[in-house]
Image (cartoon, grey):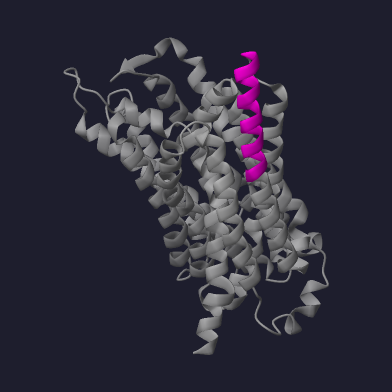
């Protein structure tokens, strides 16, 4: 009984506290326009703060993976401090930028750079170390159900948006003038407390390292080279491509929903898609525990994504979302929402299965460092996924139309799907031919 309690107190609960805090980085779209308006810059200029946050998440995970490997208490404390300080600093520079905008009538470059540094760089370090810190600990406590354990924590990262979004919207609506920077200060304090409690509780099982001394003596590179190098390259590439495709669609999600004549349901549908994101993280990873080769999960994710993307392409689902009489085309609505939900679930499932797939191939000795290195794919995708979709949509600017008072670009969004479908096919081929199956799990 004590052992079961320890699993939750020392691993699952702190993992959820950490991931439910840092996962709010995905709430950016809720307040990005408010930040832009308050400091006097375009939404496009402020969007780079989110891209930098994802980039530095991946890069800090890649470079600080060894710190996490050696001392989870140091890494979880770094995560707590950086995330809270970055959030509070973002609030300060929003406040400063707003004051300068009111005084001078133009945006302050210093304020914009300060937001990039705080939300992008400082919070990014907190995101990367906070994301990694509980993962290996969970796999050690739940060795028989590693996928379920890591899926639970990573689901917290995905569910954070669904949990925090209504809270943030309520704060913005009720804090009055300057509510945008006040919200950041309030949340910085709340998340510091949550993450610090998680930091205190997080603990590895006693004595786990005793049988692992030989394995830990190897360098990360040596561990990777112990298997065909193509296997690791394949895992990195399919992880990268899955994130790129997911971000490309998710970044246009709200606009696509408006193309279906469902502008009044954007908030509800976004919350449902966040639930699918979290559910995919938990469901796909738990399902993988029952499989001989966890890579099978990636094949399923890619096949489902290809089928739904192809269905929307062939039917012109986004372009044909509105009937001639102005009503929503029910069949198109079902297909497009199905695509959004499936891509969100597969996007989340891709994240939760990476650490367990790596541990199956390379063992537990250096898993934090190898997982951190693999998260560099997230960093690169953070700079390419959103930007690729925005670039494609901008190419079709002459096809913009007004639906229910909103300017949207159905042709542009539909064209994004051609690219993501090709990338999903490439990902499937990589998972089949490049990522070699293992004979048995370690």
What secondary structure prevails in the magenta region? helix
Tell me residue 395's x, y (percent): 51, 15
Locate residue 297, reporting x and y percent.
Answer: 47, 58
How many numbered marks are there? 0
Quarter occupied by the C terminus: bottom right
Residue at the limit of the structure toward the top, as seen here:
398
Asked if residue 408 lies left or right of residue 129, the reply is: left
Q: Relative to 193, does residue 114 appear above or below in the rendering?
A: above
* 102 part of magenta stretch: yes
Q: Which residue is at 50% across, 74% downward?
A: 145
* 225 up-or-down from 170: above or below: below
Q: Position of residue 143 (x, y in %)?
A: 57, 77
Q: Residue at x 66, y 22 (%)?
A: 100
Residues shaded magenta: 87-105
In depth, the one of 341 and 417 nearer the eye is 341
State which quadrant residue 439 falls in.
Answer: bottom right
Relative vertical location of residue 235 with respect to residue 149 in this rendering, above or below: above
Image quadrant of residue 209? bottom right
Can residue 379 be seen?
no
Asked which quadrant contains residue 253, the reply is top left
> Is residue 223 shown in magenta?
no
Classify residue 33 as left or right of residue 403.
right
């Amino acid at each position: 009984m004590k052992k079961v309690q320890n699993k939750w107190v020392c691993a699952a609960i702190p993992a959820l506290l950490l991931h439910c805090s840092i996962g709010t980085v995905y709430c950016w779209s809720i307040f990005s326009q408010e930040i832009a308006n308050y400091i006097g810059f375009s939404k496009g200029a402020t969007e780079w703060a989110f891209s930098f946050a994802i980039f530095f998440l991946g890069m800090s995970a890649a470079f600080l993976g060894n710190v996490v490997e050696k001392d989870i208490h140091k890494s979880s404390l770094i995560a707590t401090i950086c995330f809270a300080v970055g959030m509070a600093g973002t609030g300060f520079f929003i406040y400063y930028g707003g004051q300068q905008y009111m005084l001078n009538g133009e945006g302050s470059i210093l304020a914009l750079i300060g937001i990039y540094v705080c939300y992008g760089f400082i919070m990014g370090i907190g995101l990367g170390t906070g994301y990694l810190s509980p993962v290996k600990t969970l796999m050690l406590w739940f060795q028989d159900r590693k996928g379920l354990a890591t899926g639970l924590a990573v689901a917290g990262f995905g569910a954070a948006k669904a949990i925090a979004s209504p809270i943030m919207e309520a704060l913005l609506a009720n804090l009055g003038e300057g509510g945008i920077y006040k919200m950041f200060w309030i949340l910085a304090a709340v998340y510091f407390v949550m993450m610090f409690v998680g930091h205190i509780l997080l603990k590895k099982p006693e004595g786990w390292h005793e049988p692992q001394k030989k394995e830990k003596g190897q360098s990360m590179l040596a561990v990777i080279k112990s298997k065909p190098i193509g296997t690791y390259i394949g895992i990195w590439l399919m992880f990268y491509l899955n994130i790129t495709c997911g971000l490309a669609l998710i970044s246009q999600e709200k606009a696509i929903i408006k193309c279906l004549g469902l502008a009044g349901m954007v908030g509800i549908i976004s919350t449902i898609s966040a639930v699918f994101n979290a559910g995919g993280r938990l469901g796909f990873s738990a399902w993988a525990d029952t499989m001989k080769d966890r890579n099978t999960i990636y094949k399923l994710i890619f096949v489902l994504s290809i089928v739904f993307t192809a269905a929307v392409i062939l039917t012109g689902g986004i372009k044909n979302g509105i009937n001639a009489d102005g009503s929503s085309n029910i069949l198109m609505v079902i297909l497009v929402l199905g695509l959004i939900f499936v891509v969100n679930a597969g996007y989340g499932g891709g994240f939760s299965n990476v650490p367990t797939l790596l541990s199956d191939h390379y063992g537990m000795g250096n898993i934090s460092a190898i997982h951190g290195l693999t998260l560099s794919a997230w960093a690169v995708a953070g700079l390419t996924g959103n930007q690729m979709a925005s670039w494609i949509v901008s190419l079709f600017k002459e096809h913009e139309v007004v639906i229910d008072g909103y300017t949207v670009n159905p042709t542009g969004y539909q064209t994004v799907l051609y690219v993501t479908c090709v990338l999903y096919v490439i990902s499937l081929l990589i998972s089949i031919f490049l990522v070699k199956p293992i004979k048995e799990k370690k």
